[in-house]
Amino acid sequence: MLQGKKIVLGITGSIAAYKSCLIIRQLIKKGAEVQVVITPAGKEFITPITLSALTSKPVISEFFAQRDGTWHSHVDLGLWADAMLIAPATASTIGKMAHGVADNMLITTYLSMKAPVFIAPAMDLDMYAHPSTQQNLKTLQSYGNHVIEPGTGFLASKLEGKGRMEEPENIVACLEQFFSQQESLRGKKVLITAGPTYEKIDPVRFIGNYSSGKMGFALANECANRGAQVELVCGPVSSSMQTNHPSIHRINVESAQEMFEACKELFSSMDSAILCAAVADFAPEKVAEQKIKRTGDEMVIRLKPNPDIAASLGQMKKQGQTLVGFALETNDEESNAQAKLKKKNFDFIVLNSLKDEGAGFRTDTNKITIITADNKKDYPLKSKEEVAKDIIDELERL
Ligand code: CTP
């Protein structure tokens, strides 16, 4: 599982820093490549010479390699890594990570990291139990980081004392488990729709909606991280919405009709489809060729229905294919979602209620209920990345 994986190992100023050597040894034995980034305090506990001898790579600790104009790029490290592990992570580093205090190479690397981040806290019990530390750990978790807590982490620990760093073999096992889960969709093809649609009124105007595409992009990344090949059919989203995963093929469309055509073409060769886009139900009957001028007191635009992509794919669905839909509701949420589940032949539907603060459009968080024909499960408010994990877990369960 760790063969060929590139791991950035962050080491901070804790007495547990000596255990980093054991982590490095095990990672390397299992075929991983390790790049150490150490804080100034970390170097008080373990020497860079030991670490570079174990990793066969120079240790990075300063922004500037030498005083000759070369510098270490935390951005490149963020792109290079398959995972970042911070072990040991002191209360100070955890606090800085939670608040974006980028005053050393380790924190800047963390802030630039594109790969999943694992944090193994190491401190005395009082520091660990302090509400500040606990709140910072919760914050980091809500950003999608994985906290490896002694005794309560992914694996049962032999340790009694909370706050002490989890044993190196258990930390390495957490990474292995993570990478093995990632492969759980290997060989599968998933179609995902994301973002809004724009329905043209004239050359400069359209009917649109507030969907940002963030939920759909988070789902695409999650599927790709688990090894799936993703077709992301994407409405007009902001240029800041980028995908750089090699397993995500992005198809940009504008209108519901274009999205429909792209999906119809792709669906038969897919294992699953997740319809996350906020598709306009209606489009202007006629698109004016010239910009419409202001005339008279009133303006009427006649609308015609757009194809229902979900319902069409629901009809096309063959045995073995899974279809997942979304419902954004303002009232009678559950009964509306149940009705959509049946009408569109979904295997399950993800319900957002606009009554829930932090759910739905234009937020980085979401609060969902997953509804199947005979079951319903409520989830707490989470980042869209974490919500994507819950949804894909459910997809895998089916
Ligand atoms: N959907 C779709 N094509 C459409 C409309 C909706 O694929 N033309 C999909 C959405 O991506 C979502 C689900 O259907 O997964 C539910 O969308 P929603 O707009 O809530 O459903 P509607 O059928 O349009 O119901 P409503 O009457 O609430 O608008």
Image (cartoon, rainbow, N blue to C red):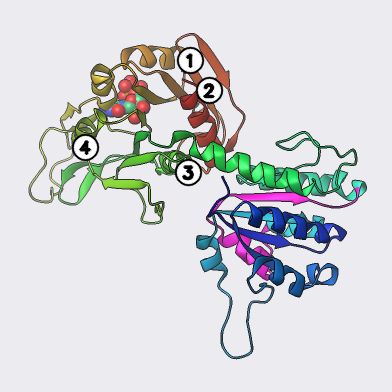
Q: Tell me, yes or no, if residue 277 can be seen here.
A: no
Label 1, label 3: how many angstroms apart (C-alpha)? 31 Å
Is 369 within the magenta?
no
Of mark 3 and mark 4, the one earlier in the sequence is: 3
Name the residue at 40% across, 18% down. 347
Find out whether the residues at labels 4 and 1 contact each other: C-beta distance under 8 Å: no
Which residue position is annotated with label 1? 334
Q: What type is the residue that disc 3 sits on?
A: Asn
Residue denoted by label 3: 225
Per the image, the residue denoted by label 4 is 262
Mark 2 or 4, nearer chain start: 4
> Dot 1: within a 10 Å radius of its alpha carbon, few (fewer than 14), some, or many (20 or more) residues?
some
Q: Secondary structure at mark 2?
A: strand
Instruction: Say above or below: 220 vs 123.
Output: above
- CA gap, disc 2 and disc 1: 9 Å
Instruction: Please report whichever mark, 4 or 1, sits nearer to the chain's N-terminal start.
Output: 4
The amino acid sitting under disc 2 is Thr
The residue singled out by tag 2 in the image is 369
Region of the chain picked out in magenta, as a range: 98-124
